[in-house]
Structures are given as structure tokens and as C-alpha cells.
Amino acid sequence: MQLESMYQEIILDHYRNPHHKGLRDQYQAEVHHVNPTCGDEVTLRVRLSDVALGENAVIEDVSYASQGCSISQASASVLSDLVIGKEVGEALAVHEAFLELMQSRGESAGDEEVLEDAVAFAGVSKFPARVKCALLSWMALKDATAQALSTGGDEKHG
Amino acid sequence: MQSNGDCRVDVAAVRRDFPILDRTVRGGKRLVYLDSGATSQKPVQVLDAEREFLLSSNAAVHRGAHQLSEEATGVYEKARNRVAEFVGAASEELVFTKNATEAINLVAYAIGNAAFAGPKSTRFRLGPGDEVVVTEMEHHANLVPWQELCKRTGATLRWFTFTDEGRLDLSEIDTLINERTRLVAFTHRSNVLGTVNPVDVLVARAREVGAITVLDACQSVPHGVLGVGAVNFPALGVDFAAFTGHKMLGPTGVGALYGRAELLDALPPFLTGGSMIESVRMEETTYTAPPQRFEAGVPMVSQVIGLAAATDYLTGVGMANIAAHEQELTELALAGLAQIPGVRVLGPTDAVNRGGAVSFNIDDIHPHDVSQVLDSLGIAVRTGHHCAWPLHRKLDEAASVRATFYLYNDADEVAALLEGVREAQRYFKAA
């Protein structure tokens, strides 16, 4: 049946070999997000270049510690690939595009120009119970960048 | 719908009463429904009872003097008699609620209200220095209301832990339940581990110190007690007990609270308003007697009638038969899972004092992913922490997969589950 439409090889690859995983010491904001239905969790840190630039600040690093299902783990990995090196505003635009894809209930294939590997999650959108898994780290990223910008960017050391 | 002496429950006959079990899911797969612990399916007899009432006698109960109102009140109260009888209680000891969560909250809030109520309810008053005891294996519904009550009153929450085998650890019982203990709340049968708790031991100790007992019977009333039959609250000796309709073939939106008559009589109300009053003046209101004191507003009449039909159905099959049937399926599942490398069962691995909730995890595969593979094969199981997060924390598991069995399940479905587990291992190359 549709198992393969959810578990694309790209997703399983990211799940088995996650990119940028682990918490790194320099960051301006750290957030902890939980999926209350299953207990999956992610701690995510962001480091921005210069918070005075606001949404033009560059995301220099995203680091995370997480535990959860293949979808949530792979999503965090894909996210880090996508947003590191982008300006906050650009990253939020990618987040919007991903959110739209996840809410499409299988109707959208996603824009590969914008979403790159994240288009592999299109199949997940057909399973409403799993959409939250895919969005967990993205919600954390949105929260973390907002916190980093609002607190003026005092750098913390973990 | 009949029992058969040889194989205890005639599953084929039972299944004919549950049309949903014939449907297919996920592209033509036969549905294997192993999630009755979350909610059971409903037989046509329950739906027919609700429909018959709504088509012929529907009216608001306990108000009005017209014929329909009389009829509706009559069938509502008759339904109360049947449900009360099912759990061995007197009718005035059975309060209908929205669900078991509301039933437990009713007790917790009413106890909190005792601080402002008359002298009759002083025995319920809680304050600093008093203790409430629960267990670490509780469903959130029998934990959070007590945490909140302690917060409101200044009482202290304490709890029993459980052993690595998933049995309640009673080694500290005499210090945990002590002269400061005012209330002991615990589950009859864990919704995750399947463990059947020793109600007699806990009730005896609680009585020694004069503490009130509250039993979460959501996972025991629907399934009965092996070798005994239906759960009987007065025989268990508990003061209060909660169960829900939708886990026992009944509708959603109806549950029940059992309370010993003497205690219900002294308990102040939780929700107030219509139906629960004796006399209302602008200055002051007095309350009517139980059970109506605890049923403010127009109650869920057709659901109550459906629940009574569900108890009739279960009684027709026989609760002892159902318990024995589920015991067989549980033994099969535990034995089968034990033979699959990389699978660990949460809770007792022997089927002694253990109900048919079988939770497990597979090494290196997240429970969500396991259940997704099972779902692709048509097998419906629960995944997550099953509203028992502290239990999972204690076991150092974030979540688990849970299969639960009921009277309409059979050995083929257990075999399908076991094959599904192997398929998940193959799919994720974990074995």
C-alpha cells in the first residue's frame, strides 16, 4: 500500500544518518518542543550572524538533540540542511512552503526549487496523524529564531 | 450473540453484530481491530436501542409531565438499574457522567468543595498535612485530577512505584498509606501494562487508616475478572469507582461513577444547576439526593440507554467467558512476541493477574513507525504514551505500541499482529 509514499528513501536516509545532529555550544536561543500525543521531543538551538539585521540575519548554525520517529528525525535533518546559511526571512519562507505542503493532504508535490529534499515529505501529508511529526522541528525553528531576534542576540554557551 | 461452552465465546457469531469489523482499510486490507482499549466497537443492538428510544420516546428526563417525558424518565432510570446491577451496585449508587475522566474529576472537585460545604461533608475536607496516594502506573485521568486537588488544598501527593516486571511495588505500603492519608486512587487494571492490581490489599490498608479509595475501573469493567465474571464494586470494597461506556461496547459521551451510598450522600456537588436541586431561592439553594445531585443539566439519555444495552449484550455473552477468551488471546500474544528477537513487552510477560493490554517496543524502530507498518496491513493498534506518560518515563520509553483484545478478536488476528511485527522489522531492516 502507501507505505512507500510515506517512507521515501530520502527520508529513511536522513533518519539513519541525520545531518547536523547534536547540540553545539554557541547559540542565541534554545527551545524545547514536545509532541504531546506521542512524547517525541526536540531541543533546538540557532546561531545567527548579526541579530541587528533582523530577518536579514544569516542562520549560521542549527543544532539539535531529538528523539522520535523516523519522520520527525528525518525532518529535523532536512531542515538543518535547508536553512543553515540562509537569512532568517528566507528560512521562514521555506517553513511556510513546507507547512503548506504538509497541509495539502497529498494534493501538492511541493516546489523542489524551494524545498529540495523536503519534497520527499509530500506523502506524509496524506497521513494527518503524522503531519505533526514532520512539523515538530520546524515549529521549534520558528520559535528559536523569533526568540533569538527578540532577545537581542546575547550569545550563550551551552 | 451467544456463548458457546466449548470455545467460550462464539467469535463468528459475535462479529456478525459488529458490521464495522467486516470493512476493509488501506486499500482492501481486512480490518484487524486491536485498539479496543482506546475505544471498543459497538454492536447493532446498542445502536438499535438508542435509535428505538429516539424514534419513539425521546424527551428530556426528570422534567415535564407529558407522556413522552414519563416514558423517557422511565427508560432512563431503568437503564440506570441495569448498569448498576452490572457492577453489583444499587441504583442510587450509580451516577452518570460524560466519561470516566469526568467521574474522577467529580470526586476530586466535590472533595475540594467540602471545604465550603456543610458539616455533613467535613470528613472529605483536605488541607496541608493530609496526603493523597496514587500510583506511577495511572492513566492521566486518575493522576492529574489528584495533582490539581492537592494544589488547591495544600495536601501532599504521594505514589506507589512499580517493579521492573510491571507489578505495583507494595513494599512501602505501610509507610505510603499512613495516618495522614485521606485518599488512595489507583487503577484496577493498567491500560498500558495490563497489570491487575491487588484491590483487596490496597483497600484493606486504606481502611485501616480511614482513607477513601477511588478505583479507575475503565480497563476492568469492560473485560471482567478471570474466573469470576463481571467486576463487582461492593465486593471489591472500594468507596468510589469510575468507568466509561465507550470502552464496553457502549456509546461515547457516557460514563459512570460508583459511590458507596453513605459517601455519596455526604458528598457536596461538583457541577450545579438544573436537576440537582431540592429547593432554590435567590438567597440559597439546597441539593437533592444522590445520584441526581451529581447529574446537573439534562443528561445524555440515549447514550445511557445504549450503555444499558451494552451491559445486556456483555451479560448475554457472559463476562466470565469474555475474560477467559481474552486470557487466551493475551497468552498467545505474549508467547508470540517473546519469540521475536528485539521485541520487549512492557509489563508482566506472564499472563497471570494480567489483562489483555499488550504494549511493546521493537529495538531501533520508533513505535509510530511500527504502527504505520501495522496500519498498512490493516491492523489498528494504539501508539504513543497512552495517556500514561509517567509510566513510560519510569520505563525509560518515550512511547510504545499497544494491542488490546476484546470479545470479537480471535487467534488469527493475534497471528496477524505477530506477522506485522516481523514485517516492521523487515521494512526498517531492524532484524
Image (cartoon, grey):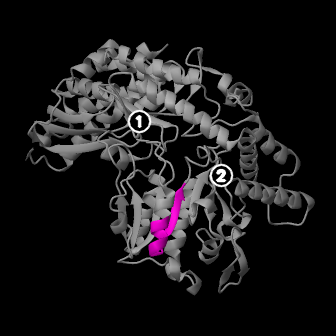
Residue B55 percent across, percent down from the top left: 86, 44
| Amino acid at the residue labelled 1 | Thr
Residue B36, quarter of the rendered image: top right
> Is residue B405 visible from the viewing direction of this image?
no
Say which residue appears at 73% left-offset and 56% top-offset.
B85
Pointer 2 and pointer 1 on the same chain:
yes
Q: Which residues are magenta?
A: B204-216
Label 1 packing within 10 angstroms: few (<14), some (14-19), many (20+):
many
Q: Are marks 2 and 1 in contact (CB under 8 Å)?
A: no
Residue B250 percent across, percent down from the top left: 68, 44
Inter-mark Cα distance, 2 to 1:
33 Å
Residue B41 percent across, percent down from the top left: 65, 35
Residue B227, quarter of the rendered image: top right
Question: Element type at marker 2?
Answer: loop
Say which residue appears at 14% left-offset and 42% top-offset.
A51
On whether residue B205 falls in the magenta region, the answer is yes
Residue B231 placement, left or right of A11: right
| Amino acid at the residue labelled 2 | Val
On whether residue B141 falls in the magenta region, the answer is no
Q: Which mark is residue B349?
A: 1
